[in-house]
Amino acid sequence: MKHKHAIVFCLSLLICANLAMAQDPKKFELGVFGGRTGSEGIEVEATAIGGGQVVTQLDPKSGSSWGFDVNYLASENWAIGFQWTRQSSKLLGQLAGGGTQEFGDLNLDNYHGTFTYHFGGADSKVRPYFFGGLGSTVYGFGQIGGFDVDGATRFSTTWGGGVKFFFTPNFGLKATVRWTPTYIKSDPEGIWCSPYYPWGCWVVGNPDYSQQAELSAGIVIRF
């Protein structure tokens, strides 16, 4: 009889523990996604590359992209996270007079810390959201003209939004639009002098940004 009571007691504890776990709010989200990214490069000083051709702009070629993000759900609406994306691309040169020249492979890796705001309640089946982030874009070059070329890391921000569709409390799908401007360099544009402070003059620069615009879709797992 005592054994039966012990078994019933243990089963009751297991049921209560399972119910408590089921009712615990989820604190993390993992997203995996893929899509396509359109890219724009920057104008460069006209450079002769042989054969009478002159390059006036360098562009990453638009192509496929994929990545993941991890978010800590700090509240019902706010999340803090990390996002990584990669675009597989080619380095293209725009030629004076028209046409392009392909120089080699190029991978663009984006690393950003993000803040995300979700609309609606935590148990909503459909949750629009938007996010912003700070971080860097890494340009990884393949061989160009038979020579190895060092990569480059530049400061970038990322901005976007989309919609998440949850089929269960733990699983859903999402669609996202993302824009990532990456600072490349500044070209001198002139000198500005303060009307309030003597000898207060500075060189004014015109910043150049390389742009990425991504459309993607993927899965979301809560845990």
Image (spheres, rainbow, N blue to C red):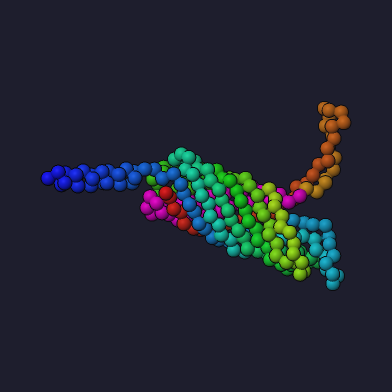
Give whichever of 69, 120 is nearer the camera: 69
Q: Is residue 44 magenta?
A: no
How many numbered dots are placed on residues in this image? 0
The quadrant holding residue 9 is: top left
- Taking the image as shown, residue 144 lies to the left or right of residue 35, namely right
Q: Can residue 162 be seen in this view?
A: yes
| Residue 165 horizontal/vertical position (percent) | 43, 53
Q: State whether residue 76 is above or below residue 163.
A: above
Q: Residue at x 77, y 60 (%)?
A: 57
Task: Say whether residue 197 is left or right of residue 118.
Answer: right
Q: Is residue 42 left or right of residue 133?
A: right
Residue interval drawn in magenta: 156-185
| One can see residue 19 in this view | no
Point out residue 84 in the picture as x, y percentages from the top left corner: 58, 53
Q: Residue at x 39, y 43 (%)?
A: 25
Q: Camera-side residue: 148 or 133?
A: 148
- Looking at the image, the residue that sits furthest to the bottom is 51
Residue in the image at 70% along x and 50% along y: 154
Q: Main secondary structure of the magenta part?
A: strand
In the image, residue 118 above or below residue 193? below
Question: In the rendering, at what x and y percent does residue 147 appear?
Answer: 76, 66
